[in-house]
Image (cartoon, rainbow, N blue to C red):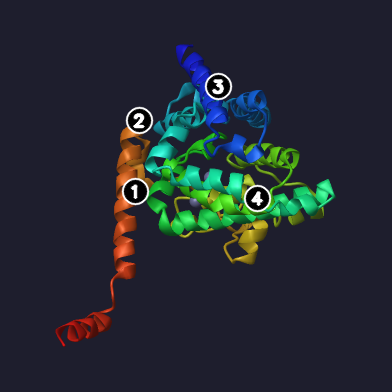
């Protein structure tokens, strides 16, 4: 009970602080009023998650539901999911994003919104067209960011992939250092487009619910031709499960929140052709061991080390270039 109380109080305090400081948060993006911004995120995220958990339990039954797994907290994976859910909603994540990213993500995000807003979407008069464009552009940015995380930030992105079961709240299971880059990647498109607040609110709310249901144990399949078509438009839970599969060849598939981008860039894997037998990364058990803050720090240190090594290799001159430079220096 005390835990729930602390959770609620810190969540609202964080929003109060973010709304006052305008430090590169979702409130900044939505440019909503003071009180509305305080009430918006924690209420939406918490009630949205509860709604999705109840919906899944309704269709699957209590025994197979994520609600049961999260209440009983039997596995380290479900406890890690709960930790990141609290970490995200309580606002503590914002502090870590600020510190681990040395304020770069927040500063760039705030700067683009305050000083660089082309507002291209304000010229689109149709709300439906505006919404469609927001969906297409944001899902495209999500796809690019996700590919980037796999290529350059795998150490921290692993935190999401080490979930050994998908629990509706698993979308919250992300390392704060990953979020620094999400801010950097998302800042420019939203500053250039400047979508109307209401359209953005609908998109953010819809996407949050969609992301949670994609991490459910439900299988979406409408009957008939429409069912087949929609599997090539949206990433369904069964398609996203392939992305979380333990099989090494699987987690480089189905990156998007829309299947469209995966099809276009050759990373789509249709769920009908693949059997997912296990979720998670069996070699990375260490990230499910109830030492969340410790693991968060170790993963961060390892990621920074890898980034530096990679940068060193990239900027190191080729042997032939180095020899020419040596001869030139000697001359
Ligand atoms: Zn991934
Ligand atoms: Zn996922």
* Helix, strand or loop at mark 4: loop
Q: Which mark is residue 117?
A: 4
Within 10 Å of the Cα at label 1, are there few (<14), some (14-19), or many (20+) other Cα atoms? Answer: few
Indicate whether 245 appears above or below 260: above
Among numbered discs 4 and 1, the one appearing first in the sequence: 4
Q: CA distance from mark 4 to mark 1?
A: 45 Å
List the residue tagged with mark 2. 290
Instruction: Classify residue 114 by image quadrant.
Output: top right
Q: Position of residue 60 (x, y in %)?
A: 64, 32
Q: Which residue is located at x 47 percent, y 29 percent?
A: 82
Indicate whether 34 appears above or below 268: above
Q: CA distance from mark 2 to mark 1?
A: 17 Å
Between disc 2 and disc 1, the foreground one is 2
Among numbered discs 4 and 3, the one appearing first in the sequence: 3
List the residue tagged with mark 1. 283
* Helix, strand or loop at mark 3: helix
* Helix, strand or loop at mark 2: loop
């Amino acid at each position: 009970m005390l835990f729930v109380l602390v959770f609620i109080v810190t969540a609202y305090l964080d929003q109060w602080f973010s709304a006052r400081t305008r430090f590169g948060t979702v409130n900044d993006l939505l440019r909503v009023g003071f009180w509305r911004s305080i009430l918006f995120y924690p209420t939406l995220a918490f009630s949205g998650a509860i709604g999705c958990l109840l919906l899944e339990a309704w269709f699957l039954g209590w025994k197979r539901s994520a609600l049961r797994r999260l209440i009983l907290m039997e596995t380290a994976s479900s406890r890690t999911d709960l930790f990141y859910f609290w970490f995200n909603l309580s606002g503590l994540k914002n502090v870590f994003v600020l510190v681990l990213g040395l304020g770069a993500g927040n500063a760039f995000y705030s700067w683009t919104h305050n000083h660089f807003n082309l507002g291209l979407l304000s010229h689109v008069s149709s709300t439906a067209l505006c919404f469609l464009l927001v969906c297409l552009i944001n899902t495209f940015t999500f796809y690019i960011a996700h590919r980037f995380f796999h290529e350059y930030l795998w150490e921290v992105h692993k935190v999401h992939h080490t979930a050994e079961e998908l629990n509706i709240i698993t979308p919250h299971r992300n390392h704060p250092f990953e979020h620094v880059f999400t801010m950097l990647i998302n800042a420019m498109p939203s500053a250039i487009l400047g979508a109307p607040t209401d359209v953005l609110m609908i998109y953010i709310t819809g996407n949050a619910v969609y992301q949670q249901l994609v991490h459910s144990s439900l299988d979406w399949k409408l009957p008939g031709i429409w069912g087949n078509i929609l599997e090539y438009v949206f990433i369904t839970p069964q398609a996203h499960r392939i992305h979380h599969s333990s099989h090494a060849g699987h987690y480089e598939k189905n990156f998007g929140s829309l299947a469209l981008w995966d099809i276009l860039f050759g990373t789509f894997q249709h769920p009908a052709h693949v059997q997912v037998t296990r979720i998670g990364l069996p070699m990375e058990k260490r990230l499910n061991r109830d030492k969340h803050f410790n693991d968060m720090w170790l993963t961060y240190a390892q990621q920074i080390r890898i980034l530096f090594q990679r940068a060193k290799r990239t900027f190191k001159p080729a042997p032939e270039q180095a020899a020419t430079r040596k001869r030139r220096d000697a001359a």
